[in-house]
Image: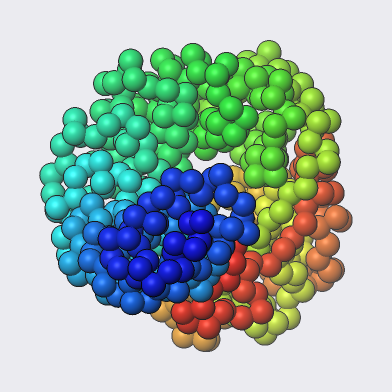
Amino acid sequence: MLYRVLTSRAASRRFELISCCRTWALHCRRITSHSDVHIASAIGSQSEGLGSLNCQQVVFLLDEVSRAGFRDPDLWGRYASRALTEVSTCSMDELCSIVRALCRADFSKRSLLNAVCRRLRAEAHKLSPRSLAQVVSDLRKLNHLDGPLLSLLVGSRTIVMSHFRTFDLPLVLCAFAQVSFRDEVQIHRLGQELCSRSGELTPSVITATFYSLALLDCGKDGTAAHLLCNYIPRVIGDASSRELVNLAFAIVILDLHAAEILSYILEQLARQSTMIGCREAHALHIIDCCVTSPEAFRPEMRASFLADPTSVSRCTDALQHIAGVIQDVPVNYAVSGSKLQKRLGRFLDRLSLPHRAEAMIGPYVLDYMLPLKIAIEVDGFKHFYSFSRRLTAKSKLKLRVLKALGWHVVSLPHFEWLPKTQDERLAYLACQIEDVSGKPLAEIRRGGGCSSSSSGGACSSRIGELVSRTRRLRPLPFSSGLPARGTFVSGVRR
């Protein structure tokens, strides 16, 4: 009945089109997927009706069809193209609704998203705290948020922290962590505001806040230590398996006295080990390497760990139990090589150094592996916090783990490598390799081939063996070439 109404000539009128869309949206979950496509096609076919809608109605239509979750990219492109013509007249709330609709869909329209972001940049001061938190969270999920845009959105006015809801504060912190934007003033204000709302903190809020502070390497201002001592022990029993893994990973990153709490988290995680997925398995592999090789911890955490043999024993037993449960969990790890990394191989060839690209060592993939346990890491822009030359917390952890496994790591920052000429890069690379390894190039050349199995670099723990056995390296989407501009790829966000 609804389909016949939509395909009738009367449905082209503005009011009836919106009414039909509203009725369809309210009942879409009761309709089969086949009928869902027919109804969406009927609405989309009314080009005259779509063209006569005003801004508010277009945004409503886009919002409702995104809630329904249909899978037709052509129809979605038609709705998004119509919404693109109304971006300049939309209010800030309507712009946030468009971003929210794009976030719900399995495919997005890049041109519409770019137009919305241009409006947000120009009028960011008009966003309410609630809208600000939601839009940065949605842009983060769409992988369309970067340091400059977040800096403009957050720094466009003096933010009154009391105007945020408690749930909104970790959303903003997660956005800072996602784009590696380490604004210490704003991060400290957000953390202090969260700590002042002790009665409203849920396990998910506490976990997201603590994990974000760890990724931003903000453990020295007292907020992370306050959460660790006063809140995290109380939420361990109620946290999900993913939240427990995030808590344990954050403790490994930060430099806090937390050996005992880490053992409690891992023991609770062992009770929920059947719920562990592939992402958690990879993080646990890193945690396991740190527990097996405490040199990977930072000084305070390492001292706390070595001074508490009971906690060490509990951590080891819990990880062994987890390893026995997740032995069949596949670990998919996407390897994406930058142009800077790929071009480095030419310089290694000119130096006549045996090398192997993207070699698996422990829980990490090395950019280049050389003989005598020498690793080369090309530190591009993503390895540093925005607007700084400070390595991210994850990059620092990778270096510590590799060094704890006995590797000599040669780090090549992009800001030192790119300004040099070809000859200067060759001399710089040779000098760095000799300085870090303590051996001349001639000895390295005689070191033989590069084999991860014979280099002794893999973690000797049980989780390390299981993850190495079940890991499957896969290229990123579009490895065979980017799709044409304006086209859609089902199931993949552009």
Residue 359 x %, y %: 74, 62
Q: How is the image coloured?
A: rainbow
Q: Where is residue 150 in the image (x, y as percent from the top left)?
A: 29, 55
Image quadrant in which you'd find residue 158: top left
Hey, which quadrant is residue 218 in on the image? top left
Residue in front for this viewpoint, 259 or 30: 30
Can residue 390 be spotted in the picture? no
Q: Which of 243 and 216 is in front in this view?
A: 243
Whether residue 91 is visible: yes
Residue 385 point in image, percent of width and height: 39, 55
Which residue occupies 24% across, 59% down? Answer: 56
Judging depth in this view, the residue of 349 and 284 nearest the camera is 284
Q: Which residue is drawn at 55% across and 57% down?
A: 36
In the image, residue 69 sits, relative to residue 324, either above or below, namely below
Q: Residue at x 83, y 38 (%)?
A: 327
Task: Determine whether, in the image, residue 316 is placed left or right of residue 345.
Answer: right
Residue 434: x and y, percent?
63, 66
Q: Which residue is drawn at 32% across and 60% down?
A: 16
Residue 35 found in image quarter: bottom right
Q: In this view, does 196 lie to the left or right of 359?
A: left
Q: In this view, does 91 lie to the left or right of 148?
A: left
